Image (spheres, helix red, strand yellow):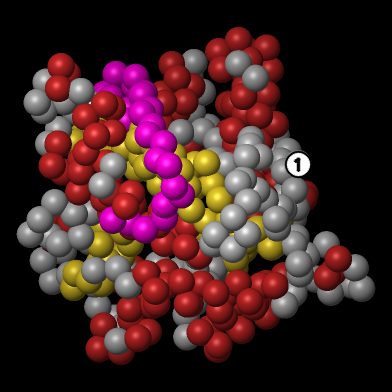
Amino acid sequence: MDAFFAAVEQRDHPELRGKPVIVGGDPAGRGVVATCSYEARRFGVHSAMTASRAKSLCPQGIFLRPRMDAYRHASQQVMEILHSYTSLVEPLSLDEAFLDVTEATSDGLLAIEIAKEIRGRIESETGLTASAGVSYNKLLAKLASDWRKPNGLMVIPPERGLAFLAPLHVSKLHGIGPATVDKLAKLEIHTVLELRHTSQQTLVSNFGKIGLWFHEVANGIDLRPVQPNRVRKSVGSERTFPTNLNDRQEMMTVLTEMVERVSSHLSALDLAGRTVSIKARFPDFQTVTRALTVPEPIWRPEAISAILPTLLARAVPTDRGAHASVRLLGVAISGLVNTQTDVVIVDQLSLLDETVLNG
């Protein structure tokens, strides 16, 4: 979906259409941007930015607090449309999903025609626009879906996969985050083509087994299936900040914003959890995780937020100084229970399937 939260606001409030809408925290406080309309993005506003910074970049921006119930309802409408074409739908978040349409194309129907029809139905039935990517694996379909946003459609056929990937920066590849980008840069690997030409032995010696994954995706290989009933080990949200955070109150505000989104996703999935964890990464890339398990499963934001001060004190202790800096923060809920069946979910996802909400 295109700028999903902001698009729902513009749909429901016609007077906001064509204006820079910023959904998230209060610019007068310490909140952050959850998402923003494309009109606001032209000013340099983006998600995870502090709301005060967004206000300075876009003084005319219209700041709105999230309405998660409205976003969940729109998400349900979209997912129903997707499921009318195939049972193989793997939601990634409220506004994004993979579809495997192999069976739907067995009678000669082209995947691009399915994508066009889905986008048309989403717009006519929900009043929202979506972008789609069509390709032969998850890696390339995801990249294609981002390529012509907003309201775009791109197809990458097998014969064009390697050429499409070659000039891209390695950060575009699934599973390669900022720390890995820096480490690859030290090896003088910046583009996918350079990564492709690096031996598996070199990648494994520097990155371990995940180096094999880097080599595969650089060569356009991604064998992950679409998993409609993927069992989750955890639901979480994390952000890497453009500028390190050094104010503990600001850290708490950011974590509270994340909890709102995690809680909404848990609710949408009929899940609750017993273990709350905080992840913190420091400027030297040291990463710590601290967790606390409660007696009964929780999912409401106020219950999760009540645990945050204790976990933040453990993750970023006072002996690091009153103004310890962090470059990344995250919140996750694990020990999941299905609230409809009360069955504890213990199956573990692979490393590359870790849930990170982007909103």
Task: Give residue 157's position: percent from left, percent from top.
Answer: 74, 55
- Point 70% across, 72% down: residue: 83
Up-down relation of residue 208 to residue 263 (above or below): above
Image vertical order of residue 17 relative to residue 213, above or below: below
SS at mark 1 in the image: loop
Q: Residue at x 47, y 26 (%)?
A: 180
* Circle 1 residue: 223
Q: Is residue 164 among what the camera can see?
A: no
Relative to the observer, which residue lies in front, 269 or 188? 269
Describe residue 29's horizontal placement relative to residue 160 as left or right. left
Q: Nearer the viewer, residue 304 or 260?
A: 304
- Residue appearing at x 20%, y 43% in the figure: 252
Check if residue 219 falls in the magenta segment. no
Q: Quadrant of residue 359?
A: bottom left
Q: Residues within 10 Å of mark 1 (few under 14, many from 20)?
A: few
Q: Position of residue 303 (x, y in %)?
A: 32, 52
Total numbered circles: 1
The structure residue drawn at horizontal position 72% and vertical position 77%, both measured from the top left corner, is 84
Q: Is 167 located above or below residue 3 in the figure?
A: above
In terms of image quadrants, where is residue 202? top right
**Residue 287 lies in the magenta-colored region:** yes
Figure quadrant of residue 29: bottom left
- Position of 279 with respect to 15 (left or right) is right
Of the residues shown, which amino acid type is indicated by label 1?
Leu
Regarding residue 61, the answer to whether it shows in the image is: yes
What span is in magenta? 280-302
Does residue 148 appear to the left or right of 299 in the view shown?
Answer: right
